[in-house]
Image: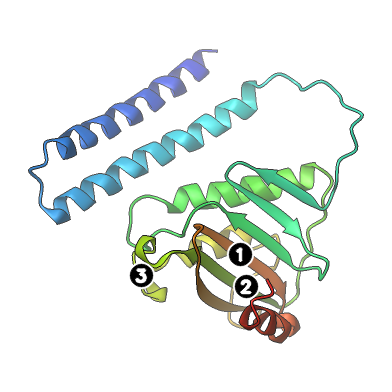
Amino acid sequence: MWFINKRIMDMQRMVDSCSKYIDTLAHGTCSSAKANALLDAAMQKIEECCISMRKICEEIRPPLPSSHTEKTIYHHQEIYGQVTVMDTGWVDIRLETLLPHCRALSGSKYITDTITRLLNKFKSEGGTLPLFEKAFVAIIEHCPMESSGVFDHDNKAFKTAINAVKGRLFQDDNQFELSLGLFTVQDIETCCHIYVMPFEAAGDFLYLLASDML
């Protein structure tokens, strides 16, 4: 267990670093730019610590008792998101967060890790993921105006989401094999849906989106 203890110490250092950034913020003497940089650095440490915790939990968790309860193979949900294969055959990956700013230090590793784990868990529960020869990916963020940060589309870290599903739902993200749409829906809840579907379904998807039927 020495290697577990070493990793726990590494996590403690991450938490300590985060605490130092927060302590500096608590003094209230920072400029807006400095405060933003400190918050970003604190989030990075917490997210790295969270990913490490996830890995350790999986490695040392004892086997769960067998259950005869019937499980659906088409839908799997976790506290940080869910994966659904819709009746249309499209894949809907819901994240309980918005995509981070592409220049932020924090966020991208956490998003990649979350999507990867959601897909892995979905498959381990018996779900089957499609592999599209040519795909259309639509990323829809649901959020109220005041919480969005009003980022330009080109500032959103959508590449993080695409790289997490590349090779699993489509082979490559070059312009001949992948088309992309970025959308925002004003909503009281805050979440992000990543829809992956065959390219020829893009028209049907846009009709459903415009008709508020998703």
Q: Which of 107 and 177 is in front in this view?
A: 107
Identify the secondary structure beneath mark 1.
strand
Q: Crowdedness of circle 3 by 10 Å Cα count: few (<14), some, many (20+)?
A: few
As drawn, 85 above or below 42: below
Left or right for 21, reference 27 = right
Tag 3 residue: 151
Q: Are marks 2 and 1 in contact (CB under 8 Å)?
A: yes
Residue occupying the far front of the picture:
188
Give how far apart the Cα atoms at labels 3 and 2 are: 19 Å
Residue beneath the point at 63% across and 78% down: 209
> Sequence-wise, which precedes: disc 3 or disc 2?
2
Quarter assignment of residue 134: bottom right
Residue 178 appears anywhere in the view: no
Percent x, y of residue 107? 42, 51
The type of residue carrying mark 1 is: Ile
x, y percent for residue 62? 71, 18
The numbered dot on residue 3 is none
